[in-house]
Image (cartoon, rainbow, N blue to C red):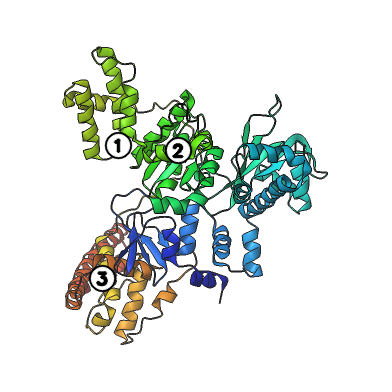
Amino acid sequence: MSDINLIKNKIDVVDLIGEYIQLKPAGVNHKGLCPFHHEKSPSFMVNRERQSWHCFGCAKGGDIFSFVQEIEGMEFREALKYLADKAGVQLTNTFKNEAESSLKNRLKNINYDASHFFYNFLLKMESAKDARDYLQKRGLTQDTIDNWQIGFVLEQWDLLTQYLLKKGHSIDDLVASGLTIKRDNANIATKQGFYDRFRGRIMFPIWDVHDTVVGFTGRVLIETDKSGGKYVNTPQTALFDKSSVIFALNKAKKSIKEKDFVVVVEGQMDVIACHQVDMTNVVAFSGTAVTAELDLHKSDAEQQKKQIGLLKRYTNNMSMAFDVDEAGEKAARRTISLAMSAGMNVKIIQIPEGAGKDPDECIKKNKEVWFEVVKNASEVMNWYFSRAFINKDINNPKDKQHIASELLDKIQHIPFAVERDYWLKELGHSLGVDISVLRDDLVRIKSEEKIPVEKKNFDKNIETKTINLPESRLNELVKTFLVLFLRFYDFIKDTPNLFSIDLSLSTGKYNELYEMLKSRYNKGNKDISNFRDYFSHENQENIIDVLLMQGEKDFFGFKENEAKNEVKILSKRIYEEWLKEEKNRIQNELSLAESKGDTDKVDELMKRFQSLS
């Protein structure tokens, strides 16, 4: 058995996809909201028997490999290695060499070795005593340090680089990983001119959702003018995409699904402190696009949306805690707006004055206070309303307008009409303003929010939209015919005169299958058991699977007699539509032959046309 088939036998497609989205049984299939396009009604189907998936909204589909490739942005060899590791399958040499040749997989190996180096240095080296003492003062237990693989690296120029080179990694890959920095005058041959990005820092590994170390955050132990900042993060690399990573999501995802809400905090130490006291549905956007000091450029907004989308795989409910300074609130407001626009239910966690400036400090003072404020988090619109009215006089027209503008800007991000209308009425009642006036103002705010185009940057790497042209009437009829024929094959196979047209020279999507079925059918060979294997191609969706799933979706309650009658009707319509198209095609060829004066061609086409009449 091949490695690919062995992996498929060990990983169930429903279980795998269920780790990303919520699936519910739907007859013989499972269905859910498609993770590849925005939709309100589920059109994403997964079939356990055939180990396949397909979205009838965006037309994407395939097997476990194509799903992982699509959702994780992996190449096939990367998906192969990831799923092999997940299934506990040892790849044969051919596949192993191909998988390990991937740059991303080489970077994963580098990060794995680096994380063990940092962790063991912290635990075993005498020179790491100050770092151990610091973590102890911060209240971290040894179990927590072990669980989060927290480490340390000395203030030396190339300690890690030299270690990783001795482990057999190339200097080019070390630079690509972001762990090593190359000077302008560096010499690759002698390995001179390269130095460590992280020096004299406590190291926190950053994992992706699959427990792979994709980057690091380093907190300086002793801050000096030359430290380069309190925190340093891995830069954007082939492996570390800031918008695709949420700190601790790998550890929190199970608890988030069970509790059906996520707590988002600002710092990594906040997350670790929460998990240490068994609040395990906590994550942080720290070191990533959401809490960075960003303007509202499109690329930054897209990064934030991607992170919100990651959380939405596990829950629609989010409670946020953020620093009470201006920068913290500004970043939080931006995240809240995006989460609300994505349809998430957002609450705000407010730590009482004197109970601590952040979750970590609050837990150290009294963990019960932290648990209580999380439990009693405010609905985000109630929080917005309370903030908007602070130091404002509703009898002052300018203050009144300021309150209205601020809150209307938040209300517009609510995607649900009923909820949006409720808060418009609440605002009207609070201000003593007619709701029709607020609706007019809402239209104005929406029009003003359009970001002006300052400068167009055309990027060749920007993904272009695929335009799906509508199928012809004949193709639609053939498709529906095949769907019913395959779904109810045992009851239809003996019905005479179903295949009556010739599609062998046509280029329609379903023509090859139609012609193969016609050949078997007209020869009296009713065995089509091997057809699915014939249409199985690596990295391609099986057309038989898609048609069968379409039948299970569209004709779930159909009776056998209904199917037989419908197939007869479709067969007749297919012939009529094919006849019409064939006559039009001959007439077009006839006009062309006449314009060229080709009398032989004209005579041939006239005979063909008359034979169809």
Which corner quadrant of the image does residue 22 belong to?
A: bottom left
The x and y percentages for residue 571 are: 21, 73
Which corner quadrant of the image does residue 591 belong to?
A: bottom left
Q: Which residue is mark 1?
A: 414
The x and y percentages for residue 588 are: 27, 60
Q: Say which of marks 3 and 1 sits in front.
A: 1
Image height of 427 relative to 344, above or below: above
* Residue under the image location 26 percent in, 67 percent down: 480
Q: Which residue occupies the foreground of this view, 287 or 536?
A: 287
Please identify the quadrant where the N terminus is shown: bottom right
Do the residues bearing badges 3 and 1 touch, measured as CB atoms within 8 Å? no
Q: Earlier in the sequence, mark 3 or mark 1?
A: 1
Do the residues bearing badges 1 and 2 touch, measured as CB atoms within 8 Å? no
SS of the residue under disc 2: helix
**What amino acid type is highlighted by mark number 3?**
Phe
The x and y percentages for residue 133 are: 69, 38
* Residue under the image location 21 percent in, 27 percent down: 439
Disc number placed over residue 160 in the picture, else none: none
* Residue under the image location 41 percent in, 27 percent down: 453
Disc number placed over residue 481 in the picture, else none: 3
SS of the residue under disc 3: helix
612 relative position to 363: left or right? left
**What amino acid type is highlighted by mark number 2?**
Trp
Q: Residue at the right extreme?
A: 190
Q: Specify few, some or many for label 3: CA neighbours under 10 Å numbering under 14, 14-19, or 20 or more.
A: many
